[in-house]
Amino acid sequence: MKRREVLWQLHSLIDNSQRFITADDIKALKIAKKAVSKEYRYRLLANLVLAIIVLIIFGSFVAMTYFMYYR
């Protein structure tokens, strides 16, 4: 599921189920909503760091090849 879908599902559970669930459950759903937001934020950051590392490694191989064969 995408982040928006998960957050929308949690939001609809909080809004639509207030008659059926207790205040503790609503608090737990709100905490879960915050956790999902943080998880996806860290996931994006991890992917960005991984992309930078791959670019550095690939760039070093290209530079090494250039200096080995063309100099």
Image (tube, helix red, strand yellow):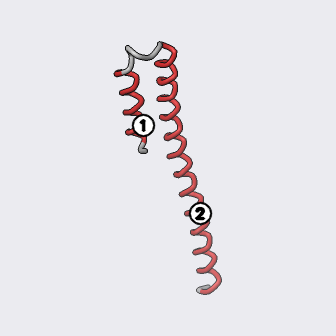
Residue 30 position within the rendered picture, expressed as x and y whole percent measured from the top left? 47, 23
What residue is disc 1 on? Answer: 6
Which residue appears at 59% of the width and 86% of the height?
70
Q: In which quarter of the view is residue 69 placed?
A: bottom right
Compared with 23, 2 (above or below) is below
Q: Nearer the viewer, residue 36 or 48?
A: 36
Q: Nearer the viewer, residue 39 or 26?
A: 26
Which residue appears at 48% of the width and 34% of the height?
37
Q: In which quarter of the view is residue 19 placed?
A: top left
In the displayed structure image, the side of residue 60 where residue 34 appears, left or right = left
Residue 53 position within the rendered picture, expressed as x and y whole percent measured from the top left? 59, 58
Task: Kindly identify which numbered label has been placed on residue 56.
Answer: 2
- Amino acid type, residue under disc 1 in the picture: Val
Q: How many marks?
A: 2
- Amino acid type, residue under disc 2 in the picture: Ile
CA gap, disc 1 and disc 2? 34 Å
Residue 15 position within the rendered picture, expressed as x and y whole percent measured from the top left? 36, 21
**Mark 1 neighbour class, 10 Å CA radius: few under 14, some 14 to 19, many 20 or more:** some
